[in-house]
Amino acid sequence: MPRHIAEYVVVHELAHLKEPRHTPAFWRHLERAMPDYEQRKAGLARPAIEVEGV
């Protein structure tokens, strides 16, 4: 997983410590911590590189 995507996942989960649900307040917390979260989140939708035999 690319580092910028992994960082998004970690910050996303840490934001859940403040707000357990994906409410508008949650997204505000996330945006304060990571202003480019939307671009990083979009990277999750891209297909992962296939590894032979997996």
Image (cartoon, rainbow, N blue to C red):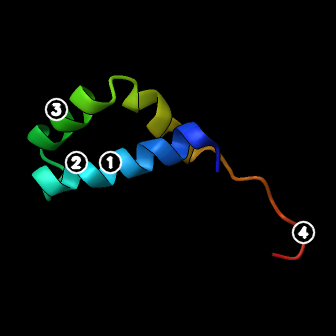
Task: Tell us which disc is closer to us: 1 or 4.
Answer: 1
Callout 2–callout 3 Cβ contact below 8 Å: no
| Residue at x 34% of width, y 45% of height | 11
Label 3, label 1: how far apart the Cα atoms are: 11 Å
Q: Mark 2 points at which residue?
A: 15
Callout 2–callout 1 Cβ contact below 8 Å: yes
Looking at the rendered structure, the secondary structure element under dot 3 is: helix
Please report whichever mark, 1 or 4, sits nearer to the chain's N-terminal start: 1
Residue 52 is labelled as: 4
Q: Mark 1 points at which residue?
A: 12
Looking at the rendered structure, the secondary structure element under dot 4 is: loop
Please report whichever mark, 3 or 4, sits nearer to the chain's N-terminal start: 3
**Image coordinates for residue 53, horizontal then vertical, percent:** 88, 76
Q: Mark 3 points at which residue?
A: 28
**Image coordinates for residue 32, horizontal then vertical, percent:** 22, 27
Q: What residue type is labelled 4?
A: Glu
Residue 4 in the figure: left or right of residue 27 = right
Q: What residue type is labelled 3?
A: Arg
Q: Which amino acid does label 2 sit on?
A: Ala
Can you name the residue that lies furthest to the right here?
52
Quadrant in the rendering for residue 17? bottom left
